[in-house]
Image (cartoon, rainbow, N blue to C red):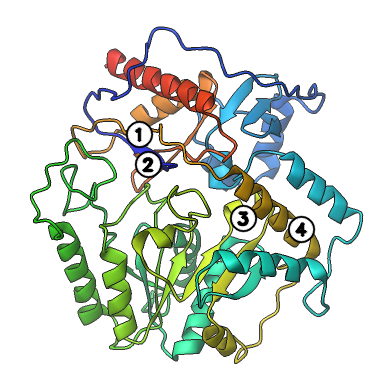
Amino acid sequence: MFLFSFLTGAARQKSAIKYCTVDIPEMPPCSFKPEEYKGMSKEQMMEIRKQNCNPMTTKITYLKKPVFIHQGYMQWLWDVDGKQYLDLFTGVATVSVGHCHPKVTTAIQKQLKKLWHTTNIYIHPELHEYCDKLAPYLPDPLKVIYLTNSGSEANELVMLMARLHTGNFDIITFRTSLFIYVICNGLYLLTYLSCPTPKSLSGWPLLTMCPDVFRGPWGGSYCRDSPVQSIRQCSCAQGACIANKHYIEQLEETFATSVPSQIAAFFGEPIQGMGGAVQYPKNYLKEAYKLVRQRGGICIADETGFGRTGSHFWGFQGHDVIPDMVTMAKGIGNGFPVGAVVTTPEIAASFVKASHFNTFGGNPLACAVASSVLDVRTDLLISIDVFEKFLIKHREPLPPEAMSEILEDIKDMGVLIGKGGVYGQTFRIQPPMCITREDVDFFLAVFNKAISGYTDRK
């Protein structure tokens, strides 16, 4: 399977993988030759970045020495100086089948020569071809698709649709969900700034505890359901989970104390990415969905899987649940801006109570790209089970300076990964599906050397 991250502890860690940490092997061979870069200098780019780019652009560049990307091909990137990198972050889990994949590139070129853009006022074949291709991948009754430009737009849209369908208003989501990072932080800030005295923020999603069995108050590295286990000596009886019991009780307390008796929706990623690669207790979503539906709400999955979880196509399938609505974006367009909301015929019918128009969603070019990505993804669906977990001694996060040092070393050795989690304590490894076993071996050696180098220095 593809693992989304390696979680790290604060103390010296010993790798479960036996690699020599003295010499880093050469990168796996790549026959592709990038074009020579002849554009503006790095100094010019940095000056423009300083003068004309919003400072938020600089804030999210967490590398000490930034990478100036020039060209990409499949799992590889090259900077303006010609240095080659193995890309295991893929634009934050977005380039799902590889940079400039030949089949996707061909589909884009073909569509560009035919029709770039028209709107839903008219009917064009590309939208219907893609919806017809995507629908069979989802279980019944999730068969009605609405295309958007991004995941953020899709997530905003499902809030409207849930409220229209249920007649209720309150929505619950996890504190560390990507939904909060991207949408709700901005909405809360906007509400705060618009009021001389901040009023009730009722109307925006209510935050409930994330059932994190690794770093949360219940569970830990001994928990059967922890994504990182030092040993498998869970004290729970077979078929029981104390951590899950407590997290469900916390959710029930949220229902009892913080929202009306009837709610609109419960919103959650089947596996959290930005929140720190959080995996929930085995039956948590199944029990949570039951509680939500008892209160008139619908269950929304912010889908992060899309063929990346190994055993199932969708992340929610790993929890043995079927949500009422699914949002998706990122990897479905391989970096091209496209998102989607998939729901049931009944919920979709409620949407027409409102008036909604999307200028770019479902345009011919986006649909052609997404359709080709779906074809390629099917060809590339593989199961790499060599991303072994590192043993963890403590659940406390590494300090920011340690994360920075390790990320910098990994980058300097030719591999790009990311970070996430509430405290930025999670290494995020989200490779494209074209990755090879040789690539994985190379990365593991680099990662092991970076960790060993840091602990040796300390």
Task: Choose the circle earlier in sequence order: 3 or 1.
Answer: 3
- Corner quadrant of residue 72: top right
Task: Choose the circle earlier in sequence order: 3 or 4.
Answer: 3
User: Which of label 1 and label 4 is nearer to you?
Assistant: 4
Mark 1–mark 4 CB contact (< 8 Å): no
- Location of residue 380 with respect to 439 vertically, above or below: below
Disc 4 packing (10 Å; few <14; some 14–19; many ≥20)? many
- Location of residue 218 with respect to 264 vertically, above or below: above
Q: Which residue is mark 1?
A: 400
Disc 3 packing (10 Å; few <14; some 14–19; many ≥20)? many
Task: Choose the circle earlier in sequence order: 4 or 2.
Answer: 4
Q: Considering the numbered disc 4 on the image, is that residue within a helix, a strand or a loop?
A: helix
Using the numbered discs, state the Cα–Cα distance from disc 2 to disc 3 in whole angstroms.
26 Å
Q: Which residue is mark 4?
A: 368
Give left or right: position of 24 versus 72: left
Mark 3–mark 1 CB contact (< 8 Å): no
- Corner quadrant of residue 18: top left
Q: Which residue is mark 2?
A: 424
For this orientation, the residue located farthest to the right is: 113
Using the numbered discs, state the Cα–Cα distance from disc 4 to disc 2 in whole angstroms.
36 Å
Using the numbered discs, state the Cα–Cα distance from disc 2 to disc 1 in whole angstroms.
7 Å
Q: Nearer the viewer, residue 122 or 410?
A: 122
> In this view of the protein, can residue 55 be seen by the observer?
no
- Looking at the rendered structure, the kind of residue marked 4 is Ala
**What residue lies at 60% left-to-right and 28% top-to-bottom?**
67
Give left or right: position of 119 versus 315: right
